[in-house]
Image (cartoon, rainbow, N blue to C red):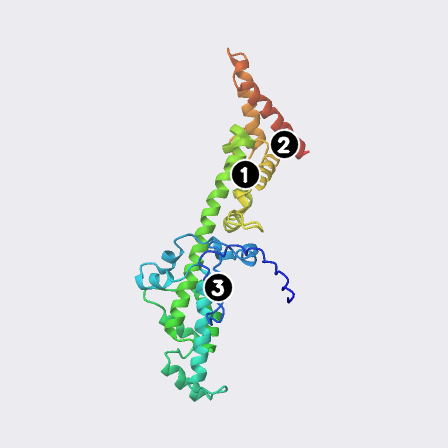
Amino acid sequence: MADEAPAVETPAEAPAPVENQTPAPESGDSSPAPVVTPVQGEIPAAEANSDAPWYSGAPDDWREQIAGEDESRLNQLKRMTEPGQVFKSFFEAQDTIRNRTESAGLPADPTPEQLTEYRAQHGIPETPADYISSLNEGLILSDQEAENLAPVFTAMHENNLPANVAADLVDTYLGVQDIEAQRRVDQDNLDATEATRAMKEHWGGDFEQNKNIMVSMLQEHLPGESMEGLMGARMPNGKAIFNDPGVMAAFAQIARTLNPAATLVPSGDNPLASLDSTIKELEAKMQEPGWHTSDGPQKYLEAVQAKEALESRQR
């Protein structure tokens, strides 16, 4: 009797296939191997850990802001999932145009005549500056915008970009700038609200007084243009300088140091004389009923201290 073949262990049962996985082919079946469908919503690790680009914070209506009233342009933008695709489209357009240029037979080193003829046939302006006259209807560049875009027009011209494509790209560029400008305005409003809240807590009832003497001090010592420039200045982090509580507190303290009488007497050429007059008026009221329960004693003390500070500085 022949020896019986040894028993073969049955492998452990394989785990259940992922949903939508096709059945394994039978022996001899030439069907392709099953394809495993990734779990929906799963984000690859590389994408999950990547830093968000600067334009990721664009508002939900960025397409509408760029397109304006142009419905056809809005429909084009709706095919894009995020602002970065606008820039991708620009580079693809450049590649396409470059390929068309090469396939059209323009030599790598064309003569001026060949280049002029090619540009005339493909809607390319004669000079970079001519792109301005070919912008989309209704768009007028300011002198500053034209100056900023001059090197861009030069690059477009060197790459033989047709005028209509350049016009759309300029619209897109200005639209992105408008979004960024509005974002800055919104942030300025938030910063101003927060700074006011913080300084009201710090100064209490003296908030308006300190704010006024700070502004008066700056107006007194700075020419108009310098004052305007300082009020519009920004810190390295982009915050407006007077939306920073620390800056406001510092300038108010400087104003009080320069003029201790600023909060006690009207501004004038002779603060000492004004303080003397104020002190005499307060001394005359000391015998009146209710003097000690009014704000008179506090005002008197502040006036005397301000006078002493001014006299000390003049010695």
Residue 256 is left or right of residue 100, and the answer is: right
> What amino acid is labelled 2 in the image?
Leu
Q: Which mark lies nearer to you, 1 or 3?
A: 3
The answer to which of 2 and 183 lies nearer the viewer is 2
Check if mark 1's residue and mark 2's residue have beta carbons within 8 Å. Answer: no
Is 145 rendered above or below residue 259? below
Look at the numbered disc 2 and give the secondary structure of its residue. helix
Q: Which mark lies nearer to you, 1 or 2?
A: 1
N-term-proximal mark, 2 vs 3: 3
Residue 61: x %, y % from top left: 38, 53
- Marks 1/3: CA distance? 81 Å
> What amino acid is labelled 3 in the image?
Ala
The answer to which image quadrant residue 112 occupies is bottom left
Q: Residue at x 40, y 84 (%)?
A: 118
Residue 267 is left or right of residue 169, and the answer is: right
In the picture of the structure, the residue carrying the numbered disc 3 is 24
> What amino acid is labelled 1 in the image?
Met
Check disc 1: other Cα within 10 Å, few if <14, some if 14-19, many if 20+.
many
The answer to which of 82 and 10 lies nearer the viewer is 10
Look at the numbered disc 3 and give the secondary structure of its residue. loop
Residue 202 visible in the snapshot: yes
N-term-proximal mark, 1 vs 2: 1
Numbered mark located on residue 214 in the image:
1
Residue 212 visible in the snapshot: no
The answer to which of 294 and 249 lies nearer the viewer is 249
- Quadrant in which the C terminus is drawn: top right
Is 240 rendered above or below residue 107? above
Is 283 rendered above or below residue 258? above
Numbered mark located on residue 90 in the image:
none
Numbered mark located on residue 310 in the image:
2
N-term-proximal mark, 1 vs 3: 3
